[in-house]
Amino acid sequence: MPPPTLSVTVAIPTYQRAAMLRETLAGLVQQDYPAPLLEILIVDNNSPDNTREVVAGFSGAAHAPKYVLETRQGANYARNRAIREARGDIIIFGDDDILIESNWVSEIVRPFQENPALRIGAVAGEVIPVFPDGCPAWVAGFHGPQAFRSDPGPLRRGQIPMSASLAFLRSTFPELGYFDTELGRKGGVVFGGDENLAIKRLLNGGYEVWFAPAARALHQMPGSRTTFKYVRKHAFDSARSRVVGRVRDDRDEGRGSTGYLLSRLAGNVAKAPAFALLGAFNFLILRAGAGKKALVRSWRSCGYLYQIQRSLRGKI
């Protein structure tokens, strides 16, 4: 790889995860990317813990992070604030609970650096879930690496990478639009789909989205995120976000959403009670893990039903 020439901003939105953020920062400040070309922004989204102090603790590092406070609640407000603050040609968004090696920035920037003639709008790194507190067997099936491809190259339409390790050409945001603040996590609300619209806008705008498997990030999933309560809530909120994202896509592209909403309504009216009965049956035969998985699927269908009726009435 030739010497890096692209300036990079790494932006980490964070909310109430100071301990994990410290581990993420420990990897960020040791990146092998040239210090004059690398900026690190930590965007605090109203954390009530000691996030500011954690960031200040790395002020003496070669890649010292900059602390930014964004008071409007929501991960996408924090991302949009990072875009406005950023000085880099490339913005790499990462989660506040990832563990990275010293080559993470170099590897995720490599496709931009080595292919200047191509219209690459975004590059996704590999995201691998890890479970520091262990993982119940029934939860494991819900998680896995993205594994889109084994070599660097473009993704197919429909392959939407996670925002936990995702780099964008900064100039595409003024051109195509910023992150949708109606989507994404807001405090304790697990409302996903943050990256979907941004990726689709790039593809519709004639840009390529690449995958860089060597840019690995370990995504920590502590015990609090493997409980039945959390997994059920995540399933419900994720289903809601998919409906909202689809309705917004249809609106942006001048299509109606009624047909999609009614088809999803019909399917999930059947799925919700069916999975609930399957869950109850598995509990009766003492297969608690299978019962929990079925109830999570039932709750996901409930999330679809809840958001579909709201969307049909014109509400988010």
Image (spheres, rainbow, N blue to C red):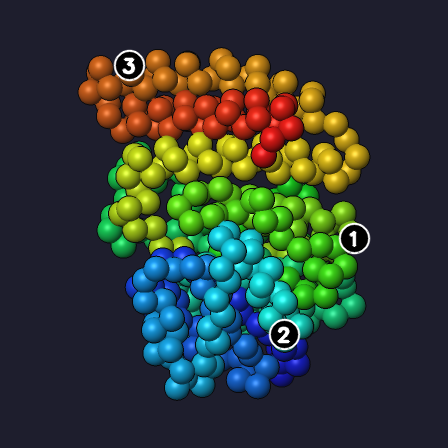
Name the residue nearer the viewer: 46 or 59.
46
Task: Count residues near mark 2 (Cα–Cα under 10 Å), then give few for <14, some for 14-19, many for 20+.
Answer: many
Q: Earlier in the sequence, mark 1 or mark 3?
A: 1
Q: Position of residue 234 (x, y in %)?
A: 41, 38
- Front residue of this view, candidates 148 and 105: 105
As helix, strand or loop, the secondary structure at mark 3 comes to helix
Residue drawn at point x = 34 percent, y = 72 percent: 54
Residue 49, image quadrant? bottom left
Question: Is label 1 in a helix, a strand or a loop?
Answer: loop
Q: Which residue is mark 3?
A: 281
Q: Is residue 227 visible?
A: yes
Q: Which residue is disc 2 drawn over?
A: 88
Tell me the mark number nearer the camera, choosing from 2 and 1.
2
Q: CA distance from mark 2 to mark 3?
A: 55 Å
Residue 217 in view: no
Residue wearing tag 1: 206
